[in-house]
Image: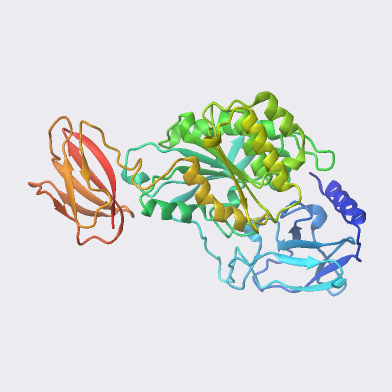
Amino acid sequence: MKSIPKLIIFLLFVFLSPEIFPQVTFKIISMPDSTPQNATIYIAGSFNGWNPGEQGFSLTLNTNNQPEITLPSGSGTIEFKFTRGSWETVEGTENGTFVPNRTFTFGNGQTVEIIIAGWEDTDGSGGGGTTAAPNVHIMSTDFGMPQLNRTRRIWVYLPPDYDTTTHSYPVLYMQDGQNLFDAKTSFSGEWEVDESLNQLFSQGYEVPIVVGIDNGGSYRIGEYTPWKNNQYGGGDGEKYVDFIVETLKPYIDAHYRTNVTTESTGIMGSSLGGLISHYAMVTYPEVFSKIGIFSPSYWFSDSVYTYTADNFDAMSIRAYLMAGDNESDETVPDLQEMATLLQNSGLSGSNLQVEIVPGGQHNEALWRQQFVTAVKWLFQLSPGVGETKTNEKTGYFYPNPSSDQLYFKAGTSNQFPDEIQLIAESGANILTSTSEIKYPICINGLCQGSYIIRFIVNDQIVNQRFIKN
């Protein structure tokens, strides 16, 4: 959406509010020395869809050569931050680390003096680092979206044992990729998807590959909405979901070891990202079966209800619907209405989970808090289930978990391993044995955690994960 319509929407909102207070001017009186010369400063917040580089919300220099911007009269509390045009260049501490959103309540003054301590892309010495785990990488900064004639950054999280196995993994596609793994690229704190899944893995869970798709900034509303809204526009959601199904997923399946089946493929998002994930569930039930819908913006269009009623096929769908009871007045009732509709359309109670979180607000903190619960339920994860990639022919090591010893249960071939490797979660090779192997194998000296035991039976390589407790 272009800047002028957003300003008009903001004006309509504030002037139709019941208690209007005078306009406010934000004036930056101090910025760090690391600020590039002639940098354009922007304000991004709850009033413009958190667009970090909207032309209509750029600051201009006053007579004292200080960047400032005046917002119209309004009411209530707004949240905001300052950027240099992107979330990579958002304001931070003097060391370039994350700072919470600023807030302003109309009626608390007409001029606010701002001090920017630092920028997240620089700490004054050339960079502020990243909070993403080592097993997260940026697959592409400009991955093509032919359905929309634009490009996008794509993130990929790989399970910690990806490089030490030959297994295929389930895949979860997630919206708002810049908010999932790295506090530096997020605008209101990250979901900590990588830290959460790594922790689950260390506890013995098999975790999925996660593909994070950046939102398109000014394109976000359009791409995350299949239908138009009279105020906010939108309507490119069909093309966006087609991009995931027709372009991105085939690429991921061709370049990573994925389990391509419907039962192993999920999609998740929050707010408008929840709306488009819901649309993907209804439109492509043969592609996505695990659906995470957080704080969905069902308010955007009533068409979501009629479209669901007319097209939803429960098939093998598992849907996790979640919202906080401290979001907007309509969020929880809308979610409950949709849950009833899904049940009436054939989704069984065992495949539908509805969570209303007491005190939960519409923010990353809530979504981060609920992510682990959702992914465990959607993919039906539990310790010790799915991690022993063996079969009846090759056999396996037991007990699992174990505190002191591992025994080997021979398979139907009645053959014991010719070679054993013990591999740490980090990928380090702790032990290789090709001599006569003695059973049981003593693991008293290992630290608690998750390990891979790789063995060869009849020239077949088997990777089994076990937990040392």
User: In which quarter of the view is residue 275 placed?
Assistant: top right
In which quadrant will I find the N terminus?
A: top right
Q: Is residue 157 left or right of residue 116?
A: left
- Tally the numbered discs: 0
Color theme of the render: rainbow
Q: Is residue 411 left or right of residue 270?
A: left
Residue 187 vs 262, above or below: the answer is below
The C terminus - image quarter:
bottom left
* Nearer the observer, 240 or 125: 240
What residue is at 58 percent from the left and 57 percent from the top?
A: 190
Q: Is 136 placed above or below 168 here?
A: below
**Relative to 169, residue 310 above or below:** above
For this view, does 398 lie left or right of residue 377? Answer: left
Measuring 48% from the left and 49% from the top, which residue is drawn there? 137
x and y, in percent, of residue 303 in the image = 75, 32
Residue 291: x and y in percent read 56, 38
Residue 242 visible in this rendered orientation of the protein: no
- Image quadrant in which you'd find residue 311: top right
- Residue 107 placed where, x, y %? 87, 69
Q: Residue at x 55, y 32 (%)?
A: 348
Q: Residue 248 in the image: state x and y as whole percent.
A: 55, 34
Q: Nearer the viewer, residue 137 or 416?
A: 416
Note whether residue 313 is visible. Answer: yes
Q: Residue sitting at 55 percent across and 66 percent down?
A: 128
